[in-house]
Image (tube, rainbow, N blue to C red):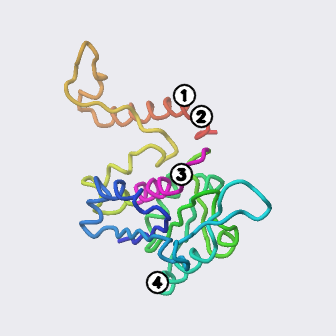
Amino acid sequence: MIRIDILTVVPELLDSPFGYSMIRRAKDSGVAELVVHNIRDYATDRHRRVDDYAFGGDAGMVMMIEPVFRIVGELKSRRDYDEVIYTSPDGERFRQKEANRLSTLGNLMILCGHYKGVDHRIREHLITKEISIGDYVLTGGELAAAVICDAVIRLLPGAMNDESSALTDSFQDDLLAPPVYTRPAEFNGWKVPEILLQGNAAAIEQWKFDRSVERTQRLRPDLTA
């Protein structure tokens, strides 16, 4: 089982991603525990303010250090965390190998970036891992946190109906997955490759591997560079 604590200023954004499909099943079956915390609950003023202007005159607001420091400290007083992750566009690019590694850990904390980001002292002193899901900027880190949670939780034993399915996903072996087909074998004149219908397991596996290599070289040559 894995526990993931998500710290956010807009917890409502995570209601849908965590309320359906595989994540919901994993939560209901006890495979994963996801706890969303509202950083505003740790603000000290009556307006529950969690942001302020940036020193130096830059445009945009910055998440304040005090509320984040309080919530991280309180959670860490209850349990040890294997990683305290910050979602940020300038973090390390999130890849399948990192999802695999995180899925083997017990307790994770994810701080969702927002506004122009968090006071950098939080990143210097409390964060152990910074993750980006791509070279673009989102309104906040909540969607990135949802992506990370989904990628990690689906790998857990018991989360998928067929656990072996994850082993053949794209990127598990630095290759894209081969094409997949289902019934009917012919539709609108479009046919499933004959080799997949013949029952020769060795030949099918070779075909899948060859197609994976071909697709990777054509679509993602950076993976084999």
Residue located at (66% from left, 54% from top): 90
Give the foreground label among 4 and 2.
4
> Residue beneath label 2, please?
221
Question: Is there CB contact under 8 Å for labels 3 and 1?
Answer: no
> Residue beneath label 3, please?
95
Instruction: Residue 5: say if magenta.
Output: no
Residue located at (67% from left, 55% from top): 60
Q: Nearer the viewer, residue 98 or 202?
A: 98
Whole-angstrom CA distance, mark 3 to mark 2, is 16 Å
Q: Give the number of marks.
A: 4
Image: 203 above or below 135: above
Identify residue type, mark 2.
Pro
On the image, the x and y values in percent for residue 154 come to 36, 56
> Residue beneath label 1, please?
218
Question: Is there CB contact under 8 Å for labels 3 and 4?
Answer: no
Give the foreground label among 4 and 1.
4
Identify residue type, mark 1.
Arg
Whole-angstrom CA distance, mark 4 to mark 1, is 46 Å
Is residue 10 left or right of 186 when viewed as pictured?
A: right
For residue 146, the mark is none
**Magenta stretch bounds:** 136-152
